[in-house]
Image (tube, helix red, strand yellow):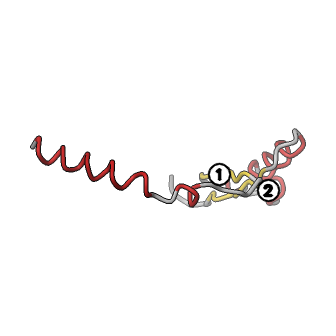
Amino acid sequence: MKTTLLFLAVVLVAVVPSANIDALETHDPVKKIVVLGDSIADGFGVDKDKSYPALLEIMLKKKGHSVKVVNAGISGSTT
């Protein structure tokens, strides 16, 4: 068991520095927020521009934030 852990530690030390860290960086100044939820998040019964994710995006932009809110809410008949 100790030999296995030592081997894994050596492999990690050898591999991690060679990982491409630049691939993890984003150069997109617009932050994305994804809203998950049910019919309330989806905006059931109201225009899409009146759903709370749309209103959240408007409010954040008014405060100077560079954001895009993605509405991933799904209306359904069961909860």
Q: Quadrant of residue 27?
A: bottom right
* Quadrant of the snapshot with the N terminus: top left
Q: Please tell me the numbered disc located at residue 35.
A: 1
Point 60% across, 52% down: residue: 36
Q: Could you say which is closer to the camera, residue 6 or residue 44?
A: 6
Mark 1 nearby-residue class (10 Å; few <14, some 14–19, many ≥20):
some
> In the displayed structure, would residue 29 be above or below residue 60?
below
Question: Mark 2 — residue?
Answer: 46
17 relative to 63 in the view: left or right: left
Is 14 in front, or is 55?
14
Mark 2 or mark 1, whichever is nearer to me = 1
The image's mark for residue 23 is none
Residue 24: percent from left, percent from top: 56, 56
- Looking at numbered disc 1 in the image, what kind of residue is underneath it? Val
Query: Who's the residue at 87% across and 38% down the image?
Result: 63
Q: Position of residue 34 (x, y in %)?
A: 65, 53
Cα separation between marks 2 and 1 = 17 Å
Q: Helix, strand or loop at disc 2?
A: loop
The residue nearer to you, when weighing 12 against 29, is 12
Name the element at disc 1: strand
Q: Quadrant of residue 18?
A: bottom left
Residue in the foreground of this view, choosing between 71 and 67: 67
Where residue 55 appears, as percent x and y from the top left, is 82, 48
